[in-house]
Image (cartoon, rainbow, N blue to C red):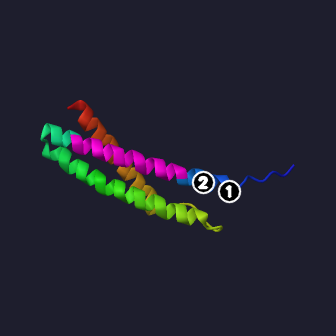
Amino acid sequence: MNRQADPGLQPQRTSLAWSRTALAMVVNAVLVLRAGMVESDAGLLLLGGLLVVVSGGFVAAGRWRRRELARPDAGGPPDWLLAWTATGTVLACLAGGWTALR
């Protein structure tokens, strides 16, 4: 029995995953900025500002990826996008750890 997967659902799930990742990054950036303001810590403010820029990039990448996935010949994400996503996620984890340990 030859079963084909429904190609319409996977791009939608991938698009939603990009949106959730971008939202999590924006929330984390705002929390780090808030912690930097409350603590008057220049390092946290700088890290929060960097996270705001990175999360803005995540939002833009998510929108771009959503348009790419709507095309019938869409492939996987480019390597640079995966590297940027991994780097931004690690940065957000470090920022969260820094604020939690202070």
Assess whether residue 71 is covered by the magenta stretch: no
Amino acid tagged 2: Gln
Crowd around label 1: few <14 · some 14–19 · many ≥20 (10 Å): few
Q: Residue at x 56, y 61 (%)?
A: 76
Do residues under tags 1 and 2 come within 8 Å of each other at their CB atoms? Answer: yes
Main SS of the magenta segment?
Answer: helix
Res 56 quadrant in image: bottom left
Q: Nearer the viewer, residue 95 or 22?
A: 22
Secondary element at tag 1: loop
Label placed on residue 8: 1
Secondary element at tag 2: helix
In the image, the segment drawn in magenta is 16-34
Residue 61 location, x and y as percent?
A: 44, 61
Q: Residue at x 53, y 61 (%)?
A: 66
Q: Is residue 22 visible?
A: yes
Residue 8 location, x and y as percent?
A: 68, 56
Residue 57 location, x and y as percent?
A: 37, 59
Up-down relation of residue 64 to residue 29 (above or below): below
Q: Nearer the viewer, residue 18 or 98?
A: 18
Separation of marks 1 and 2 at Cα, in angstroms: 7 Å
Amino acid tagged 1: Gly
